[in-house]
Amino acid sequence: MSEPVIFPLDLPELTADLEGGLLRRTVHPSGLRILTERMPSARSATVGFWVGVGSRDEQADRGDAPGSLGSTHFLEHLLFKGTPTRDAYEIATSFDRIGAENNALTAKEYTCYYAKVRDADLEGAVGVLADMVVSSVIDEAEFENEREVILEELAMASDDLADVANERFFEAVLGAHPLGRPIGGHPETIRAARRDDVMAHYLSQYDPSTLVVTAAGGVDHDRLVEWVVRALEAADSSRWGLGVDRAPARRHQATDDSAGAAPTSGTQVLLTERPSEQINLMIGTEGLRFNDPRRFAFGIMNSVLGGGMSSRLFQEIREKRGLAYSAYSFGASYSDAGVFGMYVGSAPQKAAEVVELATAELRKIAASGITTEEHERALGQIAGSSALALEDSDTRMGRLARAELGSGEFFNLDTSLERFAAVTADDIREVAALLAARPQTVVAVGDASRSTLVASE
């Protein structure tokens, strides 16, 4: 069985052959890491500036120090709003004039600013992204404007009851753990955010040791390294100090089975009343962290349980009984915690029946495993969807960054599929039994008053 490519933090240069491409990695003395995957036939490239700081890294107010709740998402917006050399309009036109697809994303453990461009325009995109990440002025007027924009964004999310159920589910399963907080913040934390506190969060968290630049597509590694270093030095060499040696940082990884969530006992049922014709149900528990060796068995189990139209949840709840339009299962994994869940949208009067059907399917796999046909079908689904995803430079760019910021292990397609193929029937049953034995949480958002669920005391 082939081994993953390891990304040691103290190795200055690394090269590895990939499926149809070439991976290269440079660790700059400042702690900055640059990774590329060259796709020989590509005429475009996707580049991302990834900072290993997410919503979990924010701090609540303390008596002796202000907090930073909401700062990570605030920065995602504000870094597009101006630097000493470009105002917000100039940043926007810099991308538009080359037809770039550009955006940013905030996650629980990282933030990314990215652009997809023609290969000929990659240097220009790197210059703008570097300027944004290093030299944002966090203008006071722009800060107040974006406060209103973010509040509108949160209001829009609040109108999507499936999103609301997802946020409530994470909060319920992970409890007081920082991963349980919503990525975008709460309206009250956004209203309370102060420009100086967000700026302090920016200055303390964004530096070369936390920055990973990844690119995939029509990209030359040596030239990209040159462009990135030059752009960062030009943007703000005084604050970032690329001439100062630093050790690159990688988030601490858990080494035991504890997810770090708030302990619960039995099944908790949480109801949120919202005007709706449906009720949005999330059912689940603590999951697996991202480096858990059982994650490959979980991937197959999840595919069989709720990964497609032939999955057990879809067939049992929708096809056989007509109780829902949408039914699926999922997993979310982080450095020291994870979440496993099942989602179903149903009529309120059918809520209790749907919850029982979903949990029963998990218990069946825990007790009896899956069939040979299901096992083979899941392997085919995973192989096909993984190969199709890798046709896109965006996916390849993100794959590099998550490996670098996460476990430091890079699994190419073949190595990953070998791990899935090595999973046994007992492995699948055991991971289902692990999840089924954990305290379950049921979150229901919608017309809860007409549902057949009873809230926990």
Image (spheres, rainbow, N blue to C red):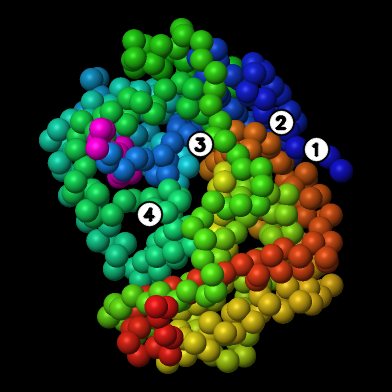
Structural distance between the alpha carbons of marks 4 and 2? 32 Å
Q: Is residue 145 above or below residue 379?
A: above
Structural distance between the alpha carbons of marks 4 and 1? 36 Å
> Which sits earlier in the primary sequence, circle 3 or circle 1?
1
Give the x, y percent position of residue 329.
58, 69
Give the x, y percent position of residue 201.
32, 31
SS label for mark 4: loop
> Which sits earlier in the primary sequence, circle 4 or circle 3?
3
Residue indicated by mark 1: 3
Structural distance between the alpha carbons of marks 4 and 3? 28 Å
Q: Which quarter of the figure is the N terminus placed in? A: top right
Q: Residues within 10 Å of mark 3 (few under 14, many from 20)?
A: many
Residue indicated by mark 2: 6
Q: Is residue 348 left or right of residue 330?
A: left
Q: Residues within 10 Å of mark 1 (few under 14, many from 20)?
A: some
What span is in magenta? 63-78
Three-letter residue code for mark 4: Pro
Q: What number is the disc on residue 182? A: 4
Q: What number is the disc on residue 46? A: 3
**Which residue is pictured at 60% across the width and 78% down the height?**
359
Q: Would you say residue 102 sits in the magenta stretch?
A: no
The residue mark sitting in front, 4 or 1, is: 4
Instruction: Name the residue at the right extreme.
Output: 1
The residue mark sitting in front, 4 or 2, is: 4
Give the x, y percent position of residue 291.
66, 45
Q: Residues within 10 Å of mark 4 (few under 14, many from 20)?
A: some
